[in-house]
Image (cartoon, helix red, strand yellow):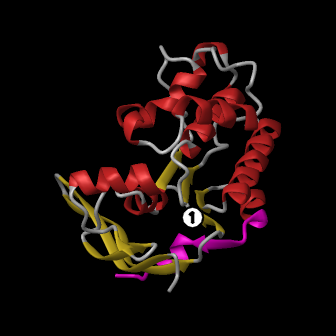
């Protein structure tokens, strides 16, 4: 059984003018530890797909299995548990909390559960920031960090829960080409070390070329 299984998934949104179909009868599989890029033009549903895989949204129909667990029909509490235990998110916009330091931003997702964790949260956050090259920036707020440094913090934050799956939505989209390459190499290195499954949305064909596999959303989605 594949690690991620998406079977006959459809998703639409209600608009004043009627339903807008984003995904229709989508099916594919991803193996554990793969680096897979999702490509396609703007508006074809790439970000929507990541939201479904991360249980931030639910499909209208179809099934989504991750590590044998049904993701497509989780209630709010179980979906939050699934994200905390299984998923790491890396976004194009870094979404760092402006009043917190880099270290505090990395710790933030798990702070409410600190006493339940089987590891020292602060120590792990420090180790991750060291791994992403920010040992000397731990006390800096986002305003004192460059774009590339902020994305490094975001990657460390995504790894804080030791996720099985990393979902990345255009993680280099707001960076200059050189910094983007550095971030991509870092993300790939961290994914290999942690043996995570990495699913990345991208418009960049160079990024798609270094992935294990590329899925074109236009080719996967069946015509209605």
Q: In this view, does 164 lie above or below 68?
A: above
Above or below, 188 relative to 224: above
104 or 90, nearer to the observer: 104
Depth check, front residue: 169 or 97? 97
The answer to whether 23 appears left or right of 183 in the picture is left
Instruction: Find residue 20 and report its image quarter.
Output: bottom left
* Whether residue 168 is visible: yes
What segment is highlighted magenta in the picture? 209-224
Q: Which residue is drawn at 63% across and 14% down?
A: 140
Residue plotted at (37% across, 72% down): 69
Q: Quadrant of residue 151?
A: top right
In this view of the protein, which residue sits in the foreground, 6 or 82? 82
Magenta-colored stretch includes residue 215 = yes
Residue 83 is situated, as x and y percent measured from the top left of the image, at 40, 52
Image coords of residue 57 (percent x, y): 31, 56
- Residue 134 lies left or right of residue 66; in this view the side is right
Q: Residues within 10 Å of mark 1 (few under 14, many from 20)?
A: some
In this view, the residue farthest toward the right is: 178
Say how many tags the image has: 1
The secondary element bearing badge 1 is classed as: loop
Instruction: Report which residue position mark 1 lands on.
Output: 40
Q: In which quarter of the image is residue 132?
A: top right
Give the farthest residue toward the bottom: 1
Residue located at (67% from left, 19% from top):
145
Residue 55 x/y as whole percent: 35, 58
The foreground one among 53 and 114 is 114
- Residue at image position (74%, 42%) is 183
Q: What is the quadrant of the C terminus in the image?
A: bottom left
| Rendering coords of residue 114 (x, y %) | 41, 34
In the rendered image, residue 72 lying in the magenta stretch gets the answer no
Instruction: Report whether 210 appears left or right of 83.
Output: right
Q: Is residue 91 visible?
A: no
């Amino acid at each position: 059984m594949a690690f991620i299984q998406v079977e006959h998934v459809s998703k639409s949104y209600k608009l004043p003018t009627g339903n807008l179909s984003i995904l229709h009868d989508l099916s594919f599989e991803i193996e554990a530890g793969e680096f897979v890029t999702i490509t396609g033009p703007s508006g074809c549903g790439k970000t929507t797909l990541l939201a479904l895989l991360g249980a931030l949204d639910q499909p209208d129909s179809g099934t989504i299995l991750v590590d044998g667990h049904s993701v497509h029909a989780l209630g709010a509490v179980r979906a939050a548990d699934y994200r905390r235990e299984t998923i790491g998110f890396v976004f194009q916009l870094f979404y760092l909390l402006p009043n917190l330091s880099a270290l505090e931003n990395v710790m933030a997702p798990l702070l409410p559960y600190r006493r339940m964790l089987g590891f020292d949260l602060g120590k792990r956050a420090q180790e991750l920031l060291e791994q992403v090259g920010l040992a000397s920036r731990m006390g800096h707020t986002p305003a004192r960090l460059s774009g590339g440094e902020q994305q490094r913090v975001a990657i460390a934050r995504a790894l804080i829960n030791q996720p099985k799956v990393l979902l990345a939505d255009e993680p280099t989209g707001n960076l200059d080409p050189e910094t983007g390459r550095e971030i991509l190499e870092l993300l790939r290195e961290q994914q290999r070390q942690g043996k995570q499954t990495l699913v990345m949305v991208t418009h960049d064909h160079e990024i798609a070329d270094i992935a294990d596999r590329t899925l074109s959303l236009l080719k996967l989605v069946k015509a209605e």
